């Protein structure tokens, strides 16, 4: 889910996940996100979530709401946008794109992940069985989720020194090279075999 990372002078003071259609931000204690600073109006701004889109709207605040240095009345937020309210910086972190395997084993993506060209250090997951056998899903995001929601979902995360996989949802435990993935994220190496809900995949690094 999308979230806001609130910081002042480069120090992160809170992280807030956006779970509601309407999330208010201001100095008054009844706001969903309270920023107790005189530069912040009592009811300063509201975040409106419409499906995958998140808008920020200024509520006629005294000092204004800025996105990437520009004063806005209402603005659609993009991943990593910087919201400025007084001395506070709020970084918007959008949803990582999820790649799922549906009931008939077809790989689906919520953006053009399938057609992103591979770079020299690009990694991918290759589907080995089912209707999507042979398809490669490029790991172009920092976090890519794979699997069936509610059954078995794993997250592959890109880190500075490689990729790791972790079980994030579902009663069915995914396996890596036949061993259950539980607890801490497990490092991935080229050729590793993943299985989620009966779908077999291979991790490949180009």
Image (cartoon, grey):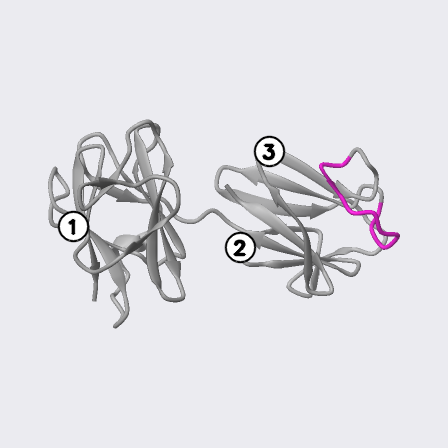
Q: What label does residue 122 carry, if any? A: none
| Residue on which disc 2 sits | 78
Q: Is residue 86 left or right of residue 72?
A: right
- Residue 147, given in percent of the width and then of the height, sits at 28, 38
What's the magenta region? 31-41
Relative to 1, say whether 170 is above or below: above
Circle 1 Cα neighbour tier, 10 Å, few/some/many (<14 / 14–19 / ≥20): some
- Residue 149, given in percent of the width and then of the height, sits at 34, 32
Circle 2 Cα neighbour tier, 10 Å, few/some/many (<14 / 14–19 / ≥20): few
C-alpha separation, residue under disc 3 versus residue under disc 2:
17 Å
Q: Give the overall secondary structure of the magenta segment.
A: loop
| Residue on which disc 1 sits | 135
- Residue 21, given in percent of the width and then of the height, sits at 59, 33
Residue found at x 69% / y 46%:
57
Relative to 132, say whether 191 is above or below: below
Q: Is residue 111 visible?
A: no
Near-viewer residue (117 or 153): 153
Residue found at x 31% / y 56%:
139
Snapshot quadrant of residue 180? top left
Near-viewer residue (179 or 21): 179
| Residue on which disc 3 sits | 21
């Amino acid at each position: 889910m999308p979230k806001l990372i609130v910081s002042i002078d480069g120090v992160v003071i809170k992280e807030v996940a956006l779970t509601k259609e309407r999330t208010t931000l201001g100095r008054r204690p009844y706001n969903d996100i309270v920023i107790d600073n005189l530069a912040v109006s009592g009811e300063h701004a509201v975040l409106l979530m419409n499906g995958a889109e998140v808008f920020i709207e200024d509520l006629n605040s005294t000092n204004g709401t800025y996105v990437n240095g520009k004063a806005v009345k209402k603005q659609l937020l993009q991943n990593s946008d910087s919201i400025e309210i007084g001395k506070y910086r709020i970084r918007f972190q959008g949803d990582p794109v999820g790649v799922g395997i549906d009931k008939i084993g077809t790989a689906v993506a919520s953006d053009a992940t399938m057609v992103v060209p591979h770079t020299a250090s690009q990694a991918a997951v290759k589907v080995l069985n089912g209707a999507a056998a042979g398809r490669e899903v490029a790991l172009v995001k920092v976090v890519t989720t794979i699997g069936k929601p509610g059954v078995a979902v794993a997250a592959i995360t890109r880190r500075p020194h490689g990729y790791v996989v972790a079980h994030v949802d579902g009663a069915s435990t995914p396996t890596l090279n036949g061993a259950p993935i539980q607890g801490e994220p497990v490092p991935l190496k080229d050729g590793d075999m993943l299985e989620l809900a009966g779908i077999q995949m291979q991790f490949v690094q180009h």
